[in-house]
Amino acid sequence: MTAAPANGHAYLDFNSPLSDSKSYDLIATLGPLEGSTVVDYGCGWAELLLRTISHAPGATGLGVDDDEYAIDRGTANIAARGLGGRVRLERADVTAWAAEPADVVVSIGASHAWGGTRGALEAMRARLKPGGRLLLGDGFWEGEPNARALDIFPRAEFSALDGLVDQALESGYRLLNLATATRDEWDSFESRWCAGRERWLSANPDHPEAAEVARVVDDHRDGWLKGYRASLGFAYLTLVRR
């Protein structure tokens, strides 16, 4: 009998609704990357950072996150891919981390750490060299949210897509590229999030914690399917610091 799963990340490539092909499209928008310093704030297990550094000769990367499981997973991937001399991860509070301004900064799904989108944009601008590029991943309302969606994601957290872009422009950036998650990417992300716990439940139906694990995954699935599936979008903005 194995221990109950601690998180839903086991079957995810990225901790956001992002496909394999789109990840490389986003990396391309950040170029030129040769010799650049790339810092990912809220990196999780740093999959996008590792791919970025792998495809940019001479570039170096730093990822910062306070999730011990994610940092351990990312550190193992760095060793497995032979990137130990070019990428390092730090377990720390991203809002307190002090580093020299970078050529490229990444912040995906981490705006809540700075109190919302505008706070994240301001914090990332201070961490970028003039002319540096920021890849920001953040939520937006692409449809009218129902009560369940608003209970999970209060309206104040997100705007419409044009409002998200306006916040970036007002915060001292120019927009290089805009991409949004497709419904297939969202469904794959949410299904994979649930899959780790569902597979564990299948293998451990009599575990003392099985009922609680089922409650967690059922609540998450209901929030997705009955709440935000029809209204929440996710955007990837490639921005240039003015």
Image (tube, rainbow, N blue to C red):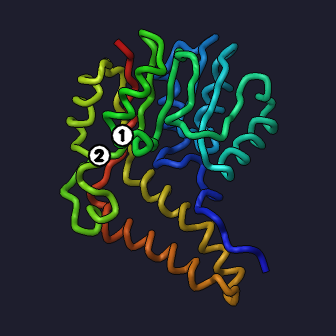
Dot 1 alpha-carbon crowd within 10 angstroms: few under 14, some 14 to 19, many 20 or more:
many
In the displayed structure, 55 sits above or below 146; it is above
The quadrant of the rendering that contains the N terminus is: bottom right
Numbered circle sitting on residue 140: 2
Dot 2 alpha-carbon crowd within 10 angstroms: few under 14, some 14 to 19, many 20 or more:
many
**Front one among 37 and 125:** 125
State if disc 2 and disc 1 touch (CB < 8 Å): yes
> Which residue is found at the position 29% from the left and 63% from the top?
149
Measured in 3D between alpha carbons, the distance from the residue under mark 1 to the one under mark 2, in whole angstroms, is 7 Å
Residue that lies at the very extreme toward the left in this rendered image = 144
> Looking at the image, is mark 1 or mark 2 earlier in the sequence?
2
> Which residue is found at the position 44% from the left and 24% from the top?
134
> Which kind of residue does numbered mark 2 sit on?
Phe
Q: Where residue 78 sits in the image (x, y, percent)?
A: 75, 35
Determine whether the residue tagged by mark 2 lies in a helix, strand or loop: strand
In the displayed structure, 79 sits above or below 202; it is above
| Residue position marked by numbered label 1 in the rendering | 235
The quadrant of the rendering that contains the C terminus is: top left
The image quadrant of residue 159 is top left
Q: Is residue 163 visible?
A: yes
Q: Where residue 167 sits in the image (x, y, percent)?
A: 25, 30
Q: Is residue 25 visible?
A: no
Q: Where residue 76 sits in the image (x, y, percent)?
A: 78, 43
Q: Is residue 177 left or right of residue 210?
A: left
> Which residue is found at the position 48% from the left and 30% from the top?
26
Q: Is residue 167 left or right of residue 239?
A: left
> Which kind of residue does numbered mark 1 sit on?
Ala
> Which residue is found at the position 56% from the left and 81% from the top?
212
